[in-house]
Image (cartoon, helix red, strand yellow):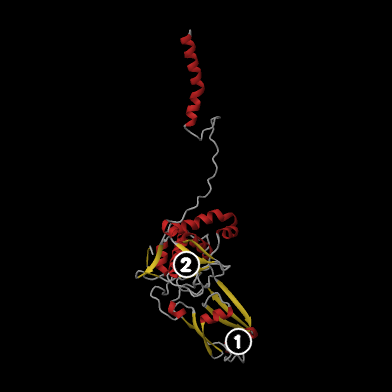
Amino acid sequence: MKRTAATALILLLLFFLIPFLFLRGDPLVSLSGGASPTATPEPTPVPSGPLDSERQIRVRMEDGTVETMSMGDYLWGVVAAEMPASFQPEALKAQAVAARTYALRKMSHTTQAHPEADVCTDHTCCQAYIAPEQAAANWGGDAAGYTNKIEAAVAQTDGMAALYDGQLIDAVFFSSAAGKTVDAVEVWGSSVPYLTGVDSPEGDEVPNYRSTVELSADDFRAKFLEAYPQADLTGAPSGWFSAPQRSSSGTVSSMTVGGVTVRGTELRSLFGLRSASFTVSVEGERIVFSVTGYGHGVGMSQYGANALARDGRTYDEILKWYYTGIQVEPYPG
């Protein structure tokens, strides 16, 4: 009787325990026999690579303070500020390498404007920069995806830089070209072997690719004479302008206005034009500038880089497209 009772007890225990033994092997199976709901995973941030994490850079912030941060953190802020996060991943990687190269070059030369820091956040002096929290506020519901996308662009190009004959290049870039980039000698007066004019594939998909600036003849006269008092702007406005001299890329290299020859870049600055690729027309008493593209036109076009990325070009191919004869490789520094 005792043996029978013991056997019955063992069988009873097995009856209740066996289901639990099986359930422990599969956490997705619930006690009711259905699959347990699984939460959608949050995007996982991609950390900077070891080279960018270990390298420190001193950054002069907008308020004048100097922050020391990793190169990876700095580059995230630059790429987020300088290029739309909606761009193709390979274009963002090209931007990360260009920004890294630019920063590394700055680190090797003391800048008179901020000797206490390697770089600043003023885009007219160094490169633009935005803090992650401000970028997230600007992006709204896209913040998580865009944050990770830029982190990936920086991490997947860890330490990579653009070199010419083993030296860091001056990796200048701009927004969009009017079909072709500009040779550095035509803008800044000095020839740079890797900053030559090349075809650039962007076009009317670029926001404000074509823009106009209109002024009354009186406003134009006042502004131009303030800068060039020797000019003769008497008579009809149609007689003020000569045919422009154009560079190999089609931008205005110079134009004679009221008997004074001025550079296209000077006219761009004086009248707030988006680029030096423009035409001038006189419509009665109004002066109309018709402008194509945005920026100085030298080096890498950002919208051109995005167009190349859409066509399947990798980030190093994009960089080699815009910077003639360079190598893209890790820079231990």
Q: Report the residue that reaches farthest toward the left.
A: 165
Q: Nearer the viewer, residue 320 or 166?
A: 166
Q: In the drawing, what numbered circle is on residue 177?
A: none
- Disc 1 element: helix
2 or 1: tag closer to the N-terminus: 1
Tell me the kind of residue under disc 1: Glu
Q: From the viewer's perspective, is residue 317 above or below residue 4?
A: below
- Disc 2 element: helix
Tell me the kind of residue under disc 2: Gly
Q: Nearer the viewer, residue 10 or 181?
A: 10
Q: Nearer the viewer, residue 251 or 28?
A: 28
Q: How many marks?
A: 2
Q: Is residue 321 visible?
A: yes
Q: From the viewer's perspective, is residue 255 above or below residue 291?
A: below
Residue bearing mark 1: 226
Residue 80 percent location from the top left of the image: 52, 62
Residue bearing mark 2: 304
Eye-nearest disc, 2 or 1: 1
Q: Is residue 307 visible?
A: no
- Horizontal side of 75 relative to 284 (left or right) equals left
Q: From the viewer's perspective, is residue 48 above or below residue 1?
A: below
- Quick one: label 1, few (<14), some, or many (20+) residues within 10 Å? few
- Horizontal side of 205 relative to 97 (left or right) equals right
Residue 59 percent location from the top left of the image: 51, 66
Q: Nearer the viewer, residue 214 or 318?
A: 318
Residue 174 percent location from the top left of the image: 49, 70
Q: Name the residue at 50% across, 26% down.
A: 19
Q: Is label 2 in contact with label 1 (beta carbons under 8 Å)?
A: no
- Quick one: label 2, few (<14), some, or many (20+) residues within 10 Å? many
Q: Name the residue at 51% across, 18% down.
A: 12
Q: Report the residue that reaches farthest toward the top.
A: 1
